Image: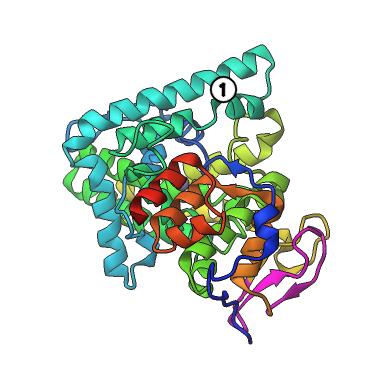
């Protein structure tokens, strides 16, 4: 197979790139923090066999923070180890250590006690904006559009990065740094990250049984909520088929793989996907920023069932002291109908990884979204160029490029258009 290599970058920009219309797109996200919080706050937590379960009760963390299940679940985008995704640990031992260390950046780190409440304030603001849009009949899409990057800038600021339009893309806080290597939030990696955290939470729940310690059960729930961030991300349309990791591994420069991921993520999120699960449910999975829309009810129900099943699994381990039943959260995980090209309902995946031949395929025609032809003879670079010219270049991806060793060349060839990034790269070049 000819590998999807990229040509030497930026040596000679094609003429087309000089005249292409380029619009900077907003930064990419998975489910927004308010969506994640809502998902987690639907989960009923039980503490005794007769307990019917309650939602929204705070769980105490070691550093003194008291957070609800949903708040902890949403913090998967804010707390973690930069450049050390859980799923990319080569052994189970490493993955377990990464999960525990990531969780403890929230649960034990004293800095989190002042930082987390600031993040929560913003999440509540986001929620208020959505609620106002719903009650006033304004579209949720418009509400998010009007919001622009305002909240992301503040998240970046709170987590140690730049605080204004001019500085947030130049100075990444932890929030943006985690987003730059968010492999745990896509595809099979999301499932592996969830599995790792859920297993640890199960062990804590079993220990809580033997110690008859309800506080230890609360810790198990808190850890599981953190693990469920990755599980829930895996339900968003743009996170199901997009081969985030394979794109990074199979393009000569990870940066280009990341940019290509972003285009496919946006496309899949926009169109949605017909999916099914092992439980026998069939439905349409929608993308990020759609959780509160009335038309996504069935999708919402599937996500809620998965996270409830996961928490119930923890509870049964606490009751019995054993891990003897299967985690039924897995039966709700959506699998794309179009994966094997059986359904003609959805757009063709822009990229897919063929396990049997170890090949990363690309849709032959990028604009013909329903064309069922793929090729293994493609270049990362020219693919990027075509997509960038047709669809713009997300400002978050521009920032990643600007921070890389290619920043100067990318600026010269017109790939960096965000004024703050243009100034940044020029200054670096001096
Ligand atoms: Zn996420």
Q: Residue drawn 42% across and 27% down?
A: 123
Where is residue 117 drawn, in percent x and y?
Answer: 29, 26
Q: Residue drawn 79% across and 71% down?
A: 373
| Residue farthest top in this picture | 136
Mark 1, other Cα within 10 Å: few <14 / some 14–19 / many ≥20:
many
- Say above or below: 270 vs 349: above
Q: Position of 202 compared to 298: left or right?
A: left
Q: Nearer the viewer, residue 24 or 58?
A: 24
Residue 364 colored magenta? yes
Where is residue 39 drawn, in percent x and y?
Answer: 50, 35
Q: Secondary structure at mark 1?
A: helix
Q: Could you tell me if residue 188 is visible in this image?
A: no
| Residue farthest bottom in this picture | 1
Q: Could you tell me if residue 129 is visible in this image?
A: yes
Label 1 within 8 A of ligand 1 by Cβ: no
Quadrant showing the C terminus: bottom left
Residue matched to label 1: 130
- Say above or below: 119 vs 388: above
Q: Main secondary structure of the magenta part?
A: loop
Q: Residue drawn 56% across and 18% down?
A: 131
Q: Answer with the quarter of the image where residue 242 lies.
A: bottom right
């Amino acid at each position: 197979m000819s590998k999807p290599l990229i040509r030497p970058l930026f040596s000679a920009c094609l003429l087309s790139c000089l005249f292409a219309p380029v619009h900077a797109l907003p930064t990419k996200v998975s489910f927004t923090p308010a969506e994640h919080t809502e998902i987690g706050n639907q989960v009923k937590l039980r503490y005794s066999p007769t307990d019917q379960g309650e939602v929204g009760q705070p769980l105490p963390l070691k550093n003194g923070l008291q957070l609800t299940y949903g708040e902890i679940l949403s913090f998967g985008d804010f707390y973690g180890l930069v450049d050390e995704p859980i799923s990319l640990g080569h052994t189970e031992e490493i993955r377990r250590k990464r999960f525990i260390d990531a969780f403890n950046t929230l649960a034990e780190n004293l800095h989190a006690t002042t930082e987390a409440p600031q993040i929560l304030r913003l999440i509540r603001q986001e929620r208020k904006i959505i609620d106002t849009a719903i009650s006033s009949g304004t579209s949720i899409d418009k509400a998010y559009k009007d919001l622009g990057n305002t909240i992301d800038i503040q998240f970046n600021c709170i987590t140690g990065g730049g605080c204004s339009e001019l500085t947030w893309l130049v100075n990444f806080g932890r929030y943006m740094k985690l987003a730059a290597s968010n492999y745990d939030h896509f595809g099979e990696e999301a499932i592996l990250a969830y599995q790792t955290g859920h297993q640890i939470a199960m062990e804590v729940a079993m220990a809580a049984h033997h110690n008859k310690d309800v506080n230890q059960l609360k810790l198990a729930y808190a850890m599981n909520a953190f693990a469920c961030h990755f599980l829930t991300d895996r339900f968003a349309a743009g996170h199901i088929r997009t081969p985030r990791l394979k794109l990074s591994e199979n393009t000569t420069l990870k940066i280009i793989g990341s940019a290509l991921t972003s285009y496919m993520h946006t496309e899949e999120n926009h169109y949605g996907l017909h999916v099914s699960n092992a439980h026998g449910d069939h439905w349409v999975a929608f993308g990020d920023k759609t959780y509160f829309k009335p038309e996504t009810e069935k999708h919402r129900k599937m996500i809620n069932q998965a996270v409830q099943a996961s928490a119930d699994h923890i509870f049964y381990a606490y009751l019995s002291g054993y891990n003897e039943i299967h985690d039924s959260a897995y039966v709700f995980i959506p699998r794309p109908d179009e994966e094997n090209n059986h359904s003609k309902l959805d757009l063709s995946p822009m990229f897919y990884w063929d396990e049997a031949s170890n090949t990363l395929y690309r849709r032959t025609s990028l604009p013909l979204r329903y064309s069922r032809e793929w090729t293994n003879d493609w270049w990362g670079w020219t693919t990027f160029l075509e997509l960038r010219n047709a669809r713009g270049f997300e400002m978050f991806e521009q920032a990643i490029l600007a921070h890389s060793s290619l920043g100067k060349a990318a600026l010269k060839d017109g790939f960096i258009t965000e004024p703050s990034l243009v100034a940044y790269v020029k200054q670096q070049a001096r």
